Amino acid sequence: MHWFTGFVLHKIAFGLLSVLLPLYITQVISGGTLTIWGMITASATLLAIPFSFMWGYFCDSTRHYRIFILLSFAAVTALLYIFSITTDLLLLWLLYVAIVLFQVAYEPPKNVLIAETYFYEDWRHGFALYGAWTQLGWVVGLLLGFLLVFLGLNNTTLLLASVFLSLLSFLFSVPLIKDPALIFERRLVAMDKSVSLVQRGAMLLSRMDFGSDVKRELGQENTYAFCAGLVLFSLATSVFFIPLPVFFAKTLALQTSAIFALFLINSTSCFLGYTLTLRNANNLDATATIRRASLFRSFLVLLPIAVGIIPFSGALVLSIIVLAVMGFVYASYSVAVLSLSMEVIPQGKVGLLTALVGIGSGIGCFVGPIIADSLGFQYMFIISASCSFLGFVAFKKFAKVAPMW
């Protein structure tokens, strides 16, 4: 859809920054280390959690969504520009925190716009379409970073390029993003689930004489288990990905352009995953998809342990395979989580999804680099795998029917 344009440009900017920033902090800024970068990202992500609730509450209570998206893009653009001309580590830290606080402002209203733009039956299609387009933007951002580094441009130029792209995301969003004329789809879904529960209860009660196990059959999803699964999966992701550019730079001695190329493969695979999910969105079993993705991820993140002990060519091929498969799996997980969260999370608390992901991500951003610096990257991968498996257990618990009494 045309109103995705601003989000695509925003993703191009942050695709470029995703690899640039950890390398910029650890290689260019005086006093910057992997642990410092982890502390910067962790503090920003954790501080963004109450803001996620706040943005979600305000946009749902005012029923104005466009203004929060425009505020996010405008503020991020201004802060990124100041970031690009700053070399003081403490000031960079504060600026990055502010960028993240405003960046999360567009997530809750974006999710609501998609949910209210499509009928409930098409939610997975809508989220898959958004994911495919924005992931394509991320791919373009990584490709742009690879080309600019290959051409010999410095880090300051790359930062300024991201500022320009962020500015374009705001300018395109001003005329394209509109608030929905009517906001009722999520309310209808909530009403439908309530009516369905009552109807199912009446049917089961009528069958009690035939030996039906009403307590087992009548119930609702375990929302707390769903929330725990979100936190654990996000934690596993951050522990794995935050130190990964530095892992490739140290373990394989790769240049910045080569690291961009590896992450480009990951994002391209993710885009292909979104495309495939889009084609089969109406047949997607969200709960089963989430469980499978968590379980598969728990085994997949262990494979890079072998990178440091096998020949360079084999290590490079293994890294490519892991990142490619991981991107493909994440696409279906993301669509399933977004669509399912709009059913599970009530109105007025739409920011809860971003907050829960932020909790896991913030903790992972902090402990991942510390584990990598103090114990080694292999322990980092083991911790990531363990968290992902615990996420699988939580999602499996969520899928089970919980007794009402």
Image (cartoon, helix red, strand yellow):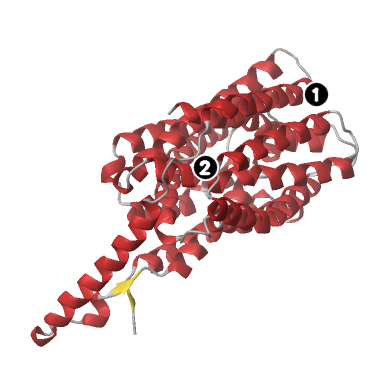
Q: Quadrant of residue 68?
A: top right
Give SS at disc 1. helix
Label 2 or label 1, whichever comes before in sequence order = 2
Vertical relation: 154 (above or below) 34: above
Q: Name the residue under label 2.
A: 110
Vertical relation: 219 (above or below) 328: below
Q: Mark 1 points at which residue?
A: 156
Vertical relation: 143 (above or below) 296: above
Image quarter in which the N terminus is found? top left
- Marks 2 and 1, how far apart at CA: 31 Å
Q: Which amino acid does label 2 sit on?
A: Lys
Q: Quadrant of residue 24?
A: top right
191 vs 158, nearest the viewer: 191
Residue 7 rendering spot, x and y as whole percentages: 55, 32
Pair 2/1: label in front = 2
327 vs 197, nearest the viewer: 197
Residue 306 rendering spot, x and y as whole percentages: 56, 44
